[in-house]
Amino acid sequence: MTVTRRALLKGVVAAGTVATFGLPVASATARERKTPPSNAVGMLYDATRCIGCKACMVKCKEANGLPPEPGPMKGVYDAPADLSGSTKNVIKLYKEGDRISYMKAQCMHCVDPACASACMISALHKGQYGIVEYDPAMCVGCRYCEIACPFNVPKYEWYTPFPKIVKCEMCRHRLAEGKVPGCVEACPREAVIFGKLKDILGDAKGRLAREPRRYYPKIYGETDGGGTQVLYLSAAGIPFEKLGLPALGDKPAPELTESLQHAIYQGFVAPFVLFSVLGVVIYRNRSAQPPGEEEKR
Amino acid sequence: MSHRPQPIGGPIVTRPFLALLAVFAAGALVILWRLVVGLGPTTGLNDGYAWGIWIAYDVVSGTALACGGYAVAILCYVLNRGKYHPMVRPAILASALGYTLAGVSIFIDVGRYWNIWKVPLLWNWNRNSILLEVAMCIMAYIVVLWIELSPAILEGFEQDDRYPRLRKLAAFIHPYLNAVMMWIITLGILLPTMHQSSLGSLMMIAGQKVHPLWHTPLLPLLFLTSCIVMGYAVVVFESSLSSEVFGRQRETRMLVSLSWVMVDVLALFLVLRLGDLALRGRLGLLLDFNMYTVFFLLEMALFLAPALLLMKRERRYNPGVEFLCAMMMMAAGTLYRFDVYLVAYNPGPGWSYFPSIPEMLVTLGLVAFELMAYMVFVKRFPILAGIAPAAAGPSPGEAVRVPAAGR
């Protein structure tokens, strides 16, 4: 007795059912695009106003109790090269010819965050005002959020046996006290401002309309990656990719994966059907065996 | 010559066993060190490459290489090819060990392991998380695999006169186990179908960070088909190896029709993989002739070569070719997984990853432990069938444990 091509094909098809099931359906049953909550807060960073003084970085560390991160000159300066387990906010410089622009890197507080979609038991989740919050009590430290985030924002404390994920939570502990985020308070030039998302977006649009020659003609985050609650304006001629903000299109990252996952596992129907079909097939095969052949299993 | 599985017998502590023990001890020390100082000093991991070989190899490739039990179960129970039955137990044993150690790897890899107990609690679940589905499925499947293996363990105790209580207990449990076994076997096919495909879905959310030659909505299906290839390949590999080492009767005829099956599954994988790239107009990316082209072509070659080699009937009867092909298929699936998780994963400029030596020691240590456990199990419990009487010959103190069931 050899395995026939047909029997094999049947088996592979049976095994693949669950996985294949969702593929054509996924695009058809694309889930609804998410919108920010009505009380959403937001931030606007205007790169043309930033002078790179890094006062926001100092204030951020103070407000969040984060340790300094010396660069090559150990012990002298706080000079983080990027976001890290001890830095939630960093000012970077972009230079091309004699043109320069500053860039503020921090959590974008996505409307539909990939990190929250990825997180197993919602340590990262959309909280009050649409802020992407982190709850260490629910975090197992799997670091899937780091894989998922299109902006590489969540960072991990690599040098401790009891690590946490570290990322900007828009100083929600300060908001609760009626204050604004640390970086916003510290900025001497109002390069970064805080407010209701609607007002912030209106402000950004106003600036673009008033001084179209000053700005690159786009508000990053208005729709990018499904929209973010931290918005960016860049100087004319400096596209956002140059500042490290990827061209994501309008689709949020979780849209494809969640549609696919929902299509496959909606109400657990497909796995249940597969289980039943397999059960019936195995049962029939089993009872078709002559009793002598029956092995202890 | 017996066609029933029986313990091989012989001493446990042999020279290879001691060598493996040394490797395992080194790995265990690193694990302790990692628990004291954290992941930074012990691994090559960083905020760009948050997952390294403990995930890409130990979990993602390791569980796929432990799909022998899954692949043989499909063949035996779904396609009703009962003649493969002698392969079930060794395959299930290898799978149970492989999955259990993948679970151990996850525990070592996650930073806040003391919170793991909160993951299975239903009310905590984020149903959108693909990782949650993978984690739950793998946890459940580890349990299922040990239940699937338990008849062998119970039989072992039933035939052992030294522990009358254990013997009684085994005899008591066994009938109940037989009654539910069909459902366990069914679960044992459903669960890998779910999580092996989801291991592919996992990297979909990384979007642009995964090179377009690898990032596709077909990832779940590609991971599923390739894990079946790997599962079959491991069964062939292990079957050939154990007949060499333990002087078992070769399962040549069976292996030949198994390789036949693999040609078709390999072909299906290649059609899906290349068809997807062609339909979505991404084949042109190969003309960039960069690192990605090289890895892609290497991967394709490893999938294509065994398919071509095994197509010819006379070559299938050549044990050397068969063994080579099995190794190529294992390498192909493993490389594909490394590509998706590490090579094709690019978090942006400035980040790089290469596993550190302690990190590799942990992986090697776990593999060593797996081999040691495998050797102990086949020597003490009825796992392998077709043992030549010479090899199974009772050594002193061993005789009582050799079952009288041989026909």
Image (spheres, coloured by chain):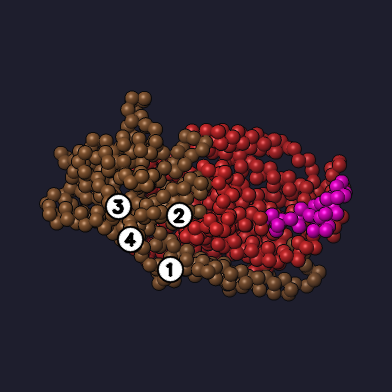
- Looking at the image, which residue is at 58% across and 37% down? B31
Mark 3–mark 2 distance (CA, rounded to whole Å): 23 Å
For the N terminus of chain B, which image quadrant?
A: bottom right
Q: Chain of mark 3?
A: A
- Give the alpha-carbon distance from disc 1 to disc 3, as whole Å: 32 Å
Rendered view: A256 above or below A61: below
Q: Which residue is mark 1?
A: A26
Give me the disc on residue A42: 3
Q: Secondary structure at mark 3?
A: strand
Q: State the residue position of label 2.
A: A118
Q: Which chain is indicated by disc 1?
A: A
For the record, the magenta segment spans B145-173
As drawn, the chain in red is: B
Q: Residues within 10 Å of mark 3 (few under 14, many from 20)?
A: many
Residue that mark 4 sits on? A38
On what subunit does the disc labeled 2 rest?
A: A
Mark 1 vs mark 3, foreground winner is 3
Camera-nearest residue between B131 and B190: B131
Q: Are marks 4 and 1 in contact (CB under 8 Å)?
A: no
Chain letter of the residue beneath label 4 in the structure image: A
Magenta span has B172? yes
Q: Earlier in the sequence, mark 1 or mark 3?
A: 1
Which color was chain A given? brown
State yes or no: discs 1 and 2 in contact (Cβ < 8 Å): no
The percent position of residue B393, horizontal first and vertical second, equals 83, 47
